[in-house]
Image (spheres, rainbow, N blue to C red):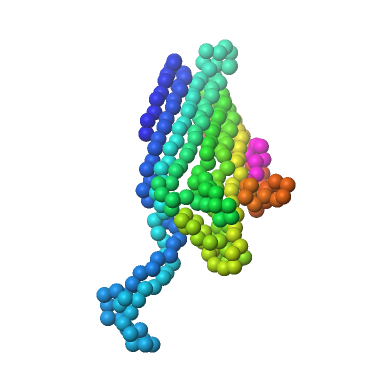
Amino acid sequence: NWSLEFYPNKDTQFSYGTFKNNIRISDPISCTKTATLFGGTDTLNPASGASIDSQSFTYSTFCDGPGFIRKGNEWAVKTAFTFLPWYFKYLGFDGNYATLHSTATSAAGTTQDPVTGATLPPLNEPAYYYNASFWYDDGSTNVRIAYQARDEVFNCIEPCGATSGSVRNTPNLSAQYTLTSLTYNPGYPVFTEKTAYLDAKITHKWKGGVEGYVSIKNALNTTTTSYQGNYGALADGTPTVLVLSYPCSRIDVGITIRR
């Protein structure tokens, strides 16, 4: 990990950070192994009476996920506008922008679209995300408006962990396909669409230890969409939407009295 920070004055900070992680073992994945489970024993087959010392058995289990290398960069800035006149001197801004990119250390670490064979992005990894917040703080009143956004992420290949249904994939090196049998009816990659959220909160302190606040979350009424990208799109390019979640906005009002 490396970082570079610059402070042009007491109220401002610019920074750049970069990292590289060599992940040798990733999350467990389902896999199939073949082994002589009774090797070195005198166990006999109760039906035939033959020794099963050298007999191979195939069984489902979990294996360590393949390794990968993840790289990232982040640019950030923090500043307070104390040089401005009047109440504007209580304003400030914080923001950061980051990028992520992973590469498999072997062919076993890649996930492929079972129809086209195209290499898919890393699981659950957005290509970028950023945050920005404007704030006001004069000691009595605090106002913060925050905006967060991230790119789409690749989740899984249909049927995404299900062990029944009509979607049947053939295995490949990535071992991401959980339903592998005939007849062949391949599933499509599933993504979570890029999102952006806007939140705001106002807090005010009165004399006598009384403090009140009003906050709103998801002011933009952002929805969360699970879809198949361009891989399962309709003939006119319209994406196939699997899940559309609408959490709505949420407004909270509260008051605190301290004695």
**86 to the left or right of 238:** left
Residue 62 in the image: state x and y as whole percent: 42, 61
**100 to the left or right of 86:** left
> Up-down: is 185 above or below 154?
below
Q: Which residue is drawn at 58% across and 48% down?
A: 191
**In front: 107, or 17?**
107
Residue 147 in the image: state x and y as whole percent: 58, 33
> Up-down: is 65 above or below 128?
below
**In front: 231, or 37?**
231
Q: Which residue is drawn at 70% across and 46% down?
A: 237
- Whether the magenta-drawn stretch holds residue 204 is answered as no
Label tally: 0
Q: Residue furthest front?
A: 116
Residue 37 in the image: state x and y as whole percent: 34, 72
Magenta stretch: helix, strand or loop mostly: loop
Q: What's drawn in magenta, residue-wise?
A: 218-224
- Whether the magenta-drawn stretch holds residue 222 is answered as yes
Please say whether residue 198 is visible from this viewpoint: yes
Q: Residue at x 55, y 29 (%)?
A: 133
> Up-down: is 31 above or below 233?
below
Residue 153 in the image: state x and y as whole percent: 55, 45
Please say whether residue 257 is visible from this viewpoint: no
**211 to the left or right of 34:** right
Q: Residue at x 49, y 33 (%)?
A: 98
**In front: 241, or 119?**
119
> Up-down: is 110 above or below 79?
below
**27 to the left or right of 38:** right
